Image (tube, grey):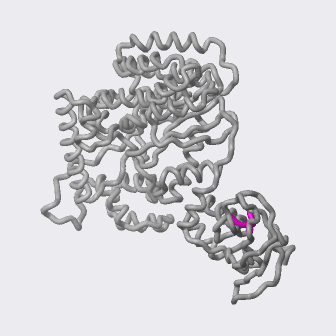
């Protein structure tokens, strides 16, 4: 038993089985003396005895409880304020503890990995039962490991409650590990943290003005590096904001090239009248909100004030405030359907004059179609040249001739999707995306905006990847900045002004290899941990679990 379960400074007396799956180990101190904890005087005079019954690590699947005989000694030093003292076992038990140190460590490691309730359920099966509350208290008592003082850090925000409460994550970019979680993302909190770390030499961040101001206040000598991925993201967002304003105008542009008839679907199948009415009612409600935002904006209210008073998301308020017309959803393309592989057969039979849905469905069944006749009826309903025999007479409408075949040029994509296409190189686009881009570039203003956007993306990509930047990248950025500030498009000019104000960090991001990409990876890990705790963990517990697991 001593070999299986050694007890520091103790010797076994015997082992007693208390029942199925439970053992009691009787033990006592190995030495016949003890040292007074106050005056450190040795004593061999025993005053009395009592027993402690802490739980210990299990043995062979059996829960173990110690019955430790503890002696109380007289202290013979007259100057000592203690008259008696109990012998202690510091390597086995903490003072007043009901669990051995090694059991506490095992339960703490399990709690760090799984959390309170999951770990409690698992430990009960491993013969180390404890409550979830005790586990959380144990995790909070585990000391944080000592780390080296960082010199190069990355900073980013993370959502404790998305849309409401945000914090700050700090990562050591040289050692690839998180350092701290801060309770908010304000400049004052970030500056206070930097003042406690005066050795910081470089800070990689996104283009948040709060982090820029906090770094300037807390570490004015540190080099600030703007993350390149965020520069590309901000460019796409700038293009999307511009498209939200001009999208109604761009939709009026004619398609370029010859339109080739095609059997490929360009829209979803028709829906039931009730669904169409519900969608129209929803659009009407959003139009009322759009008019309200435009009226408040014309009255001089700020975007933040409109956001607070209307309850709309900040992005929605910004989109409505600057849109000349109500921004309807753009074309998103139809989803996949089990009818798609058989469209060629349906179009062929329809051109031959067959408008019997059941006949078409029976033919498709022989070709392997697994669906029902309802899907064939929905497809045929938009292509009938005459009402079906089963149509109620009062619902029949005069025939207007066969519809024209759909063309290969789809409607213009939504601003968000179109912004992705406009910033990609032409050789990287598929046929539909390339056609949409060529159609948009007929507009002179669009041509200027797209040219500036692509130029800036090329400059940013040239600055990625190496420890030494490509020669001429800074002059190229300066030339782009000068052109963008006088391009005549307000959205692009404001974007260029914001880059110029943050010019030192942007140029450092183009020159230096550092970025805040590690922050994004650590935020993903933090999200996984937060969601495993059902989003209910307090910041101190989440911070301790996150840093200890790293």
Q: Nearer the viewer, residue 77 or 396?
A: 77
| Front residue (pair 145, 325) | 145
Q: Residue furthest left?
A: 394
Image position of 153 (left or right of 163): right
Does 231 sit above or below residue 397? above
Where residue 506 appears, x then y in whole percent? 53, 21
User: In the current view of this chain or complex, which residue is farthest to the bottom?
Assistant: 19
Q: Is residue 92 magenta?
A: yes
Residue at screen point 31% across, 27% down: 246
Q: Position of residue 65 (x, y in %)?
A: 70, 78
Does residue 236 appear anywhere in the picture?
no
Residue depicted at x 23% and y 44%: 286
Residue at 26% from the left image edge and 57% from the top image edge: 275
Residue 384 visible in the current orientation:
yes
User: In the drawing, does residue 91 fall left or right of residue 432?
Assistant: right
Q: Which quarter of the figure has residue 109? A: bottom right
The span picked out in magenta is 87-94
Q: Position of residue 476 (x, y in %)?
A: 56, 12
Q: Quadrant of the N terminus?
A: bottom right
């Amino acid at each position: 038993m001593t070999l299986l379960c050694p007890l520091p400074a103790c010797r076994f007396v015997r082992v007693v089985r208390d029942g199925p799956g439970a053992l009691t180990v009787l033990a006592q101190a190995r030495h016949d003396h003890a040292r007074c904890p106050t005056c450190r005087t040795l004593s061999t005079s025993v005053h009395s005895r009592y027993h402690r019954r802490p739980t210990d690590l299990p043995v062979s699947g059996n829960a173990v409880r110690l019955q430790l005989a503890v002696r109380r000694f007289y202290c013979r030093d007259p100057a000592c304020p203690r008259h008696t003292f109990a012998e202690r076992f510091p390597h086995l038990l903490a003072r007043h503890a009901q669990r051995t140190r090694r059991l506490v460590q095992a339960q703490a490691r399990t709690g760090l990995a799984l959390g309170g309730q999951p770990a409690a359920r698992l430990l009960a099966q491993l013969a180390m039962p404890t409550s979830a509350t005790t586990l959380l208290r144990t995790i909070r008592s585990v000391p944080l490991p000592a780390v080296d003082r960082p010199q190069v850090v990355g900073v980013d925000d993370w959502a404790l409650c998305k849309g409401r409460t945000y914090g700050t994550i700090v990562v050591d970019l040289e050692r690839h590990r998180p350092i701290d979680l801060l309770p908010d993302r304000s400049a004052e909190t970030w500056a206070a943290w930097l003042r406690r770390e005066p050795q910081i030499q470089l800070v990689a961040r996104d283009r948040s003005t709060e982090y820029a101001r906090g770094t300037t206040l807390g570490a004015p000598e540190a080099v600030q590096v703007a993350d390149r991925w965020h520069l590309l993201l901000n460019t796409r967002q700038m293009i999307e904001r511009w498209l939200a304003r001009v999208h109604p105008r761009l939709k009026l542009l004619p398609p370029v090239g010859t339109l080739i008839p095609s059997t490929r679907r360009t829209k979803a199948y028709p829906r039931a009248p009730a669904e169409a009415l519900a969608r129209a009612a929803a659009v009407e409600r959003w139009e009322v909100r759009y008019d309200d935002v435009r009226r408040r904006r014309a009255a001089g209210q700020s975007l933040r004030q409109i956001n607070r008073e209307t309850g709309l998301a900040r992005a929605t308020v910004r989109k409505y405030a600057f849109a000349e017309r109500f921004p309807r959803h753009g074309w998103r393309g139809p989803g996949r359907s089990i009818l798609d592989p058989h469209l060629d057969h349906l179009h062929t039979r329809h051109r031959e004059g067959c408008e019997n849905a059941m006949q078409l469905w029976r033919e498709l069944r022989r070709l392997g179609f697994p669906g029902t006749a309802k899907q064939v009826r929905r497809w045929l309903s938009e292509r009938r040249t005459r009402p079906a025999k089963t149509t109620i007479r009062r619902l029949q409408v005069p025939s207007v001739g066969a519809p024209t075949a759909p063309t290969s040029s789809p409607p213009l994509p939504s601003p968000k999707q179109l912004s992705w296409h406009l910033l990609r190189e032409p050789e990287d686009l598929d046929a539909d995306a390339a056609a949409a881009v060529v159609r948009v570039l007929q507009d002179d203003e669009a041509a200027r905006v797209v040219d500036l956007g692509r130029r800036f993306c090329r400059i940013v990509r040239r600055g990625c990847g190496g420890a030494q930047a490509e020669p001429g990248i800074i002059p190229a950025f300066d030339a782009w900045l000068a052109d963008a500030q006088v391009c005549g498009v307000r959205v692009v000019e404001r974007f260029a002004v914001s880059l110029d104000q943050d010019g030192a960090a942007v140029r450092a991001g183009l020159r230096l290899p550092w970025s805040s990409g590690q922050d994004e990876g650590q935020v993903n890990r933090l999200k996984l941990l937060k969601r495993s705790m059902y989003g209910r963990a307090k910041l101190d517990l989440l911070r301790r679990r996150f840093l200890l697991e790293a």
